Image (cartoon, grey):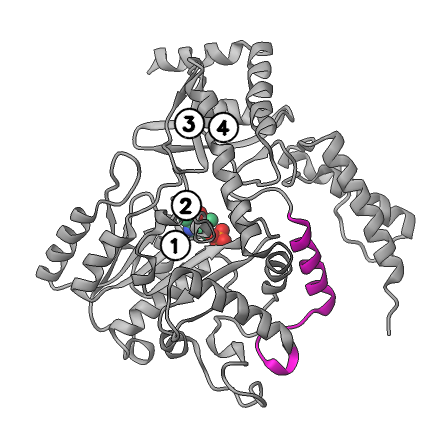
């Protein structure tokens, strides 16, 4: 057997380097992409590299890589580090199972199923429910759309499209909806984007109006995607009201909770997805609000029959022992599949469901601190709303795209920008539950200091506005 003990020693040494860097330089020095290959030796060569050189290159790569776990990283839509989840992921790498069969994954199958079972219980799905771990939120949405399509027309799987299907989602929803409609054979042009209200939630009355029109025009309404935490504003579509409509017209209702679906763990905030038990499928990303390493996405299906109908395929070479409930490959998209469950399970097991609740609640607490700061300071204008961990603002009317770029290029802090209706703004995301209120105030502090030292930033916007 190969001895990897020296690699593990090196691993520990490199992790020390990383943790130290995170302390000393929470925002990594940025390398311009056009200078990247001149700055670090990333080349692959025919000859071997001696250990010391190898180590030096690794250190350089670590130091120059953007730091996502520090208290100055507020970019979309993950951040921080949950130690017990890191532990689980490292073990998953060492164990290196593929999640398709009980034969090769053993208890890991039970770990995945336990997370799915508990999640289904939390949202009130019944005993027929089940789920799987896709590669991410986009893939979860894709699997939901495929199940909706096949539920509407079981012949679609073998014959292809025979009726003009349409899917509905809000104009604020994630862009994967458009890609997925094309992958699923429904077509990008057959998505209806429903307008959102003034705080970013899909307007149910407009959805119903559009459905009626489509039926009249000979289309087959197939799928409604509701979003729990829209990508920019963090808004929650009204699941209960949308379920009234999907039930009335016999349309699949999926809730995309990739960003904020983890509110299901919070007694205080789960009202934001009220009616979730009436949906046909629901997905959430534990690598976003829960803070596990990338990626950890879960899709739950109210009736597991749909998972089997759409995704199972017999393969005698693969499924040689045990029943379907233990051979998870029968309900997954891929064949070989990484173990994304263990890292979530080690965290959940160690902190309990109450601990996950605290992780979620902490993010809203940090958001409230940011809101309070912005509202009490006239130099800021606010563009986001309560019950969201996306805090959208502008400072002294500085062009937000310019401000974010300058903050990043000068290693001050990493934060993104977004747009809603006519407005563009800084989008500050309080998703790192390791942070405290001081870290939030520190963000505003470093931002203001930077602007004070670079007053020309304020002028730039004025020039741009005058020229418009
Ligand atoms: C992040 C996000 C997705 C995509 O998830 P990935 O894991 O990045 O593919 C989908 N929907 C929403 C609302 C998201 O915020």
Report which residue position mark 2 lands on: 269
Alpha carbon distance from label 3 to label 4: 19 Å
Magenta region includes residue 295: no
> To which quarter of the image does residue 195 belong?
top left
Please tell me whether residue 409 is drawn above or below residue 227 in the rendered image: above
Alpha carbon distance from label 3 to label 2: 26 Å
What secondary structure do most residues of the magenta stretch adopt?
Answer: helix
The first of marks 3 and 2 along the sequence is 2
Tell me: 362 left or right of 165.
right
Report which residue position mark 4 lands on: 369
Q: Which residue is drawn at 59% across and 70% down?
A: 111
Alpha carbon distance from label 1 to label 4: 27 Å
- The quadrant in which the C terminus is found is top left
Q: Give the range drawn in magenta.
A: 82-104
Crowd class of label 3 (few under 14; some 14 to 19; many from 20; radius 10 Å): many
Q: Which residue is drawn at 26% across and 34% down?
A: 198
Q: Element under label 2?
A: loop
Alpha carbon distance from label 1 to label 2: 16 Å
Magenta region includes residue 85: yes
Marks 1 and 3: CB-CB under 8 Å?
A: no
The mark closer to the camera, 1 or 4, is 4
Whether disc 1's CB lies below 8 Å from ligand 1 is answered: yes
The mark closer to the camera, 3 or 4, is 4
Q: Element under label 4?
A: helix
The first of marks 1 and 3 along the sequence is 1
Indicate the position of residue 106 as horizontal and vertical percent values: 64, 78
Indicate the position of residue 201 as horizontal and vertical percent values: 29, 42
Report which residue position mark 3 lands on: 425
Please tell me whether residue 442 is drawn above or below residue 123 in the rendered image: above
- The quadrant in which the N terminus is found is bottom right
Q: Can residue 76 be seen in this view?
A: no
């Amino acid at each position: 057997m190969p001895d990897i003990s020296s690699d593990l020693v090196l691993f520990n040494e490199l992790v020390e380097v990383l943790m130290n860097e995170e302390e000393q330089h929470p925002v990594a020095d940025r390398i311009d992409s056009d200078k990247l290959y001149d700055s670090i030796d990333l080349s692959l060569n025919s000859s071997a590299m001696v250990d010391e050189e190898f180590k030096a290159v690794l250190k350089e790569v670590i130091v120059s890589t953007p730091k996502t776990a520090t208290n100055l990283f507020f970019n979309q839509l993950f951040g921080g580090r949950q130690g017990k989840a890191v532990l689980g992921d490292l073990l998953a790498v060492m164990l290196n199972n593929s999640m398709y069969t009980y034969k090769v994954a053993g208890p890991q199958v039970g770990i995945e199923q336990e997370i799915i079972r508990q999640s289904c219980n939390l949202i009130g799905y019944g005993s027929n429910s089940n789920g799987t771990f896709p590669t991410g939120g986009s893939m979860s949405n894709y699997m939901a759309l495929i199940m909706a399509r096949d539920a509407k027309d079981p012949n679609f799987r073998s014959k292809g499209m025979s009726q003009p299907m349409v899917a509905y989602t809000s104009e604020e929803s994630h862009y994967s909806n458009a890609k997925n409609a094309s992958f699923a054979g429904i077509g990008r042009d057959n998505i209806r984007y429903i307008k959102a209200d003034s705080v970013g939630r899909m307007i149910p009355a407009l959805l119903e109006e559009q459905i009626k029109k489509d039926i009249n025009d000979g289309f087959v309404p197939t799928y409604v995607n509701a979003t729990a935490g829209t990508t920019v504003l963090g808004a929650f579509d009204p699941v209960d009201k949308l379920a009234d409509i999907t039930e009335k017209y016999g349309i699949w209702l999926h809730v995309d909770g990739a960003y904020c679906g983890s509110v299901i763990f919070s007694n205080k905030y789960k009202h934001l997805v009220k009616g979730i038990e009436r949906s046909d499928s629901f997905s959430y990303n534990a690598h976003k609000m829960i803070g596990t390493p990338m990626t950890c996405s879960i899709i739950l299906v109210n009736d597991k029959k749909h998972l089997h109908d759409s995704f199972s395929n017999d393969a005698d070479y693969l499924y040689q022992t045990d029943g379907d409930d233990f051979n998870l490959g029968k309900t997954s998209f891929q064949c070989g599949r990484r173990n994304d469950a263990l890292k979530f399970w080690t965290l959940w097991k160690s902190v309990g469901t109450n601990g996950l609740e605290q992780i979620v609640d902490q993010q809203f607490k940090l958001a409230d601190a940011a809101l309070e700061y912005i509202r009490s300071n006239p130099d800021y204008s606010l563009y986001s709303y309560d019950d969201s961990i996306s805090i959208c603002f502008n400072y002294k009317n500085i062009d937000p795209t310019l401000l974010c770029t300058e903050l990043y290029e000068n290693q001050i802090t990493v934060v993104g920008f977004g747009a809603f209706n006519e407005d563009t703004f800084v989008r500050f995301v309080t998703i790192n539950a390791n942070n405290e209120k001081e870290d939030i105030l520190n963000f505003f502090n470093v931002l203001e200091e930077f602007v004070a030292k670079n007053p020309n930033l304020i002028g730039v916007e004025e020039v741009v506005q005058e020229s418009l």
